[in-house]
Image (cartoon, rainbow, N blue to C red):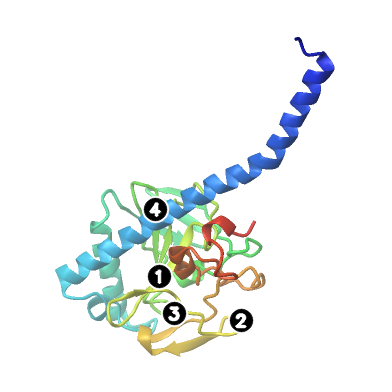
Amino acid sequence: MAFTLAEVLITLGIIGIVAAMTLPSLIANHRNQELQTRFRKAYSTLWNIHMRMISDYNGVYENFIQKDLAANNTDLVNKKYEYIDIFKKYLSGGKMCTFSNSYLSCSGKSVIVKYKTYTGNKEAELKADIVADRAIITSDGMSFFFGSTQFRNARIYIDTNGNAKGPNRLGFDVFAFDINNNDKIIFPKNIGSGSGGAYEDDEELGGTVGAVNVCSIKEKANRYNGFGCSEYALADKSPDNPNISYWKNLPK
């Protein structure tokens, strides 16, 4: 029995409506699964390098990082630079680049990179908190940034899929980790309050670290929102509801 033109058009219309309703969700789920896979790979890469450096140099924190440094302490700043240079050697095909004033420059080529917060409505407070002339880009698309010696000396930031791919948002493809004075990789803590940029002491990190390392859809005004997401991403638990998946419920 043949279908009439009207029946065919109605059927196609229904298919189109169903596709329009389900396709965005399917695309988002695929993207989130890919972001989770990249996060796990990046965390594993960081962990393995850190363990190898502990073995090869009999410790990392005391030898290279210590606490946050005065800006004019050249000897200790050079120690941090030495750490980054050594870190690069453990990355096959890693390139040393610079990241200054939102410009990421590698091999003479520069691109503008602006990272957003977890909720996506603010530019993240990142560019002022990293070592500007020491960023590492890997052959498989990851970017490693290192906390400034003055305010974030114990911190490492990872863009899990590189700046070109996006979404370039904290808690999506950009994550922060700290190294404490026991040579443990730990998650940044929310040690401040409110949406300001105050700094407080944290003895576990051996000095002064940035406050408000938050991760929440409620912190839309906070330019540090997303620096506290690593813990939730690894556990796959939403920061706003621990009963649901982190990766399946990323903010839009």
- Residue 177 is marked as 1
Residue 176 shows up from this direction: yes
Q: Amino acid at mark 3?
A: Phe
**How far separated are the C-alphas under marks 1 and 3?**
14 Å
* Viewer-closest of 214 and 138: 214
| Residue identified by numbered label 3 | 151
Q: Position of residue 143 (x, y in %)?
A: 40, 56
Indicate which disc, 4 or 1, sits on the residue closer to the N terminus.
4
| Residue identified by numbered label 4 | 142
| Residue identified by numbered label 2 | 196
The N terminus lies in quadrant: top right
Marks 4 & 3, CB-CB < 8 Å contact = no
Indicate which disc, 2 or 4, sits on the residue closer to the N terminus.
4
- For the residue labelled by badge 4, is the local secondary structure a helix, a strand or a loop? loop
| Mark whose residue sits in front, 1 or 3 | 1
**How far separated are the C-alphas under marks 2 and 1?**
21 Å
| In the image, farthest residue toward the front | 1
Check disc 1: other Cα within 10 Å, few if <14, some if 14-19, many if 20+.
many
* Viewer-closest of 40 and 167: 40
**How far separated are the C-alphas under marks 2 and 3?**
15 Å
183 to 176, vertically: above or below: below
Q: Amino acid at mark 4?
A: Met
Q: Amino acid at mark 1?
A: Phe
Indicate which disc, 1 or 3, sits on the residue closer to the N terminus.
3
Indicate which disc, 2 or 3, sits on the residue closer to the N terminus.
3
The quarter holding residue 10 reads top right
| Mark whose residue sits in front, 2 or 1 | 1
